[in-house]
Amino acid sequence: MTKPFKLLALSTLIAATLSACISTTNAVGLSSEQVTKDITYLASDELKGRANFSPEIEMAADYISQRFSEIGLKTFNGLSSYKQTFSITSITPKSLNVTINNHAFSSENLAFASTKSSINWQDTSTINTLVVGEKDDMRTALRKLNNQGGEHLVLINKAHKDLFARYQNYFNKGLTKLSLKETGSLVLVLTNETKVNSLNVSAATEKSTKSLSNVVAVLPGKTKPNELVLFSAHYDHLGEDENGKAIFNGADDDASGTTAVINLADYFSKKQNNARTLVFSAFTAEEIGGFGSRYFSQQLNPDDVVAMVNIEMIGKPSKFGAGTIWMTGMERSNLGELLNKSLKPHNMKVYKDPYPEQGLFYRSDNATLARLGVPAHSFSSTQLDKDQHYHQTSDDISSLDLNSMFKVIESLSIATEDLVNGKITPTRVDTSKVRGHGKIY
């Protein structure tokens, strides 16, 4: 049995914030005191920003597991613990040599991404060659090749040198993959050359494998146990800066969402009237590519998931007021409409994503399940156009409005009541209209 966790002493500012919160259990059975305890620990310096692969993210996983155990939840799919452990592979470029038409290119004009251990191209008939001209859309061209997979040599006009440098920097950091399957290679050459008469390309990568864990718990359904409702958030964040002198605590992103998932689990467990099976998941690896949700999605039949409520950054008031919430992709299913019917008698509302230009539907773990047809949406209150704390060391608990956050959790508990009780079933997401994952990078 996991040892109890001791909360850190709070600063005067934090103590003042906490004392301002409602200190009793609210009308629907949610405890603001417990919400405060959970987020205070998850966003504490003790966890050093919950970076992936760090000892501290394991401490966070242990804490979430302990809370699920205290609530009395079951493990997922017969696992021996709440931790759903999996491996991901890092693929780092080691060497790249390119000679085209007897001209050897310098490294500053080369970049590559590959899921293979090595590349050896000497025959243009075995690869696809693409020229990105001065007036072509380089980003769109590379996205298309990435979605196709396979072996590609791309000659990029020097007019795109700035964007090329960005891709070069990105590829040099290496790839992270959930699968060891070799899906293709992309070699970029910055040149005004447009024809390849002769070719010699050799490259090598280095692969290493590490483990991470989602934390998943289940409240079995009473009358519709084969229908699942998923409540989720990611518990990983950025960790410390390069010098280890500053911590990216990730209080809003996404200790707030993780806290909501834990306390909604507690709430529905106490009510004991859920017709459908409820799955509560704290995903890892969201910040490095959403690999936690990707692995999770492979461990169940997505057709069984009636809806996914992914909670992402709810620690501050939205532009619609304190305690209000908005959802991504409202047009992709009627989940938002159904939730609003439940909220209307309470004079509450789920708003449409006010930042469509940000592409937020694809920027959290909901996208993985949505690609499989699940009515999967993220729910947030962040003001992205004004938030000065996003991915900054200032995203700590003192920057949050805990009263507003508690009201958001309360709103979600009311909004999802009929979803949990099996009284409403949202329409599925049209997978043909959801952008897929790239196959190479």
Image (cartoon, rainbow, N blue to C red):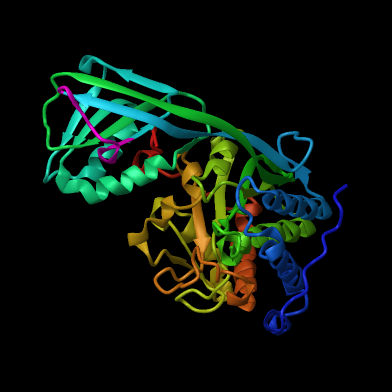
Residue 86 lies left or right of residue 189; in this view the side is right
Give whichever of 424, 283 is nearer the camera.
283
Q: Using the image, determine if residue 366 lies above or below residue 194.
A: below
Visible in this render: residue 156? yes
Left or right, residue 250 beside residue 429: right
Looking at the image, residue 379 lies above or below residue 205: below
| 281 vs 15, nearest the viewer | 15
Foreground pick, 50 / 268: 50
The count of marks equals 0
Q: Residue at x 13, y 40 (%)?
A: 133
Q: Quadrant of residue 331?
A: bottom left
Q: Is residue 127 left or right of residue 81?
A: left
Q: Residue at x 15, y 47 (%)?
A: 159
**Residue at horizontal 63 percent and vertical 41 percent from the top:** 227
The boundaries of the magenta stretch are 101-111
Q: Position of residue 321 (x, y in %)?
A: 50, 79
Q: Is residue 261 left or right of residue 197?
A: right
Can residue 148 be spotted in the picture? no
Percent coordinates x, y for residue 388 in the rendering? 46, 73
Residue 64 x, y percent position in the rendering: 73, 53
Q: Is residue 102 magenta?
A: yes
